[in-house]
Image: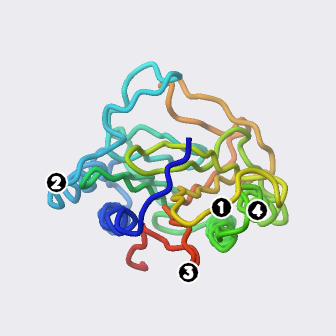
Amino acid sequence: MVELKTDTSIDEMYAAGQVVGQALTAVRKAADVGVSLLELDEVAREVLRAAGATSPFLGYRPSFAPVPFPAVICASVNDAIVHGIPTGYRLCDGDLVSIDCGAELGGWAGDSAISFTVGGARPADVRLIETAERALAAGIDAAVVGNHIGDIAHAIGSVCRAAGYGIPDGFGGHGIGRKMHEDPGVPNEGRPGRGMPLRHGMVLAIEPMLIASGKDGYHAAPDGWTLRTNDGSRAAHVEHTVAITDAGPRILTAREAL
């Protein structure tokens, strides 16, 4: 069931989204060669603590997970697509890093993700990340009253496929509100004009995931959480929480440009 948010509720969700944006900005600034993923998790924890927010990631355990998630960020490096558990791994020159973070504040959730490189960037990684950002922008542009979920999915998928990238099947965005994951699902590929109509008050987490090789295959790592590409190729993941309004899409997790 989809809950339509009031304008006041959307403003409250914006407050939660701003905490997420601040956490991702702080993590991005702290990420450097030699910094561990656990240290980046602590950076995000401090931002949440300072804002009086909590993490919807920490302790989260969906049906597929062997253990509750132990961190406040997902840190996915190189061939990890999403859901990477922060470890003592120290970033190396040229790593491609995707950070996903959420926050709960005042009873509302926000969710967002960024991808970036550390140290010297490979041109192929820059292109992958830039395409992921373009796919996200296209999905957001399609998130308007009168369109359908399929229009968002088609916009994202068209950008990804035209650039020759793979899309992990079965993973995509979702509704968000009082809980981090709500209805409806938001696929990263689909047919325009199909699916649920978009209405004022819907709030969606829109999140393209791209695989560099153009293949769609992935598998779960031994930790039961991290999803990795089957062929070892690199992946990128970006995300914003977006409100559907009569005035157009409103990004609730906007962050400082770096």
The answer for how far apart the CA atoms under marks 3 and 4 are is 18 Å
Are the two marked residues, 1 and 4, in contact with CB atoms closer than 8 angstroms?
yes
At label 1, counting other C-alpha atoms closer than 10 Å, the crowd grade (few under 14, some 14-19, many 20 or more) is: many
Q: Earlier in the sequence, mark 1 or mark 4?
A: 4
The disc labelled 3 sits on which kind of residue?
Answer: Ala
At label 3, counting other C-alpha atoms closer than 10 Å, the crowd grade (few under 14, some 14-19, many 20 or more) is: few
Q: Give the label, 2 or 1, closer to the camera.
A: 1
Q: Earlier in the sequence, mark 2 or mark 4?
A: 2
Quarter occupied by the C terminus: bottom left
Q: In the structure shown, which secondary structural element does the residue marked by tag 1 occupy?
A: loop
Badge 1 is on which residue? 198
Badge 3 is on which residue? 247
Query: Observer-nearest residue: 163 or 205?
Result: 205
Q: Is residue 246 left or right of residue 14?
A: right
Above or below, comparing residue 72 to residue 117 in the picture: above
At label 4, counting other C-alpha atoms closer than 10 Å, the crowd grade (few under 14, some 14-19, many 20 or more) is: many
- Residue occupying image coordinates x 63% and y 66%: 136
Q: In the structure shown, which secondary structural element does the residue marked by tag 4 occupy?
A: helix
Q: Give the label, 1 or 4, closer to the camera.
A: 1
From this viewpoint, is residue 174 visible? yes
Expressed as whole percent of the image width and height from the top left, the position of residue 214 reads: 80, 51
Badge 2 is on which residue? 49
Q: Earlier in the sequence, mark 2 or mark 3?
A: 2
The disc labelled 4 sits on which kind of residue?
Answer: Asp
Q: Give the label, 2 or 4, closer to the camera.
A: 4
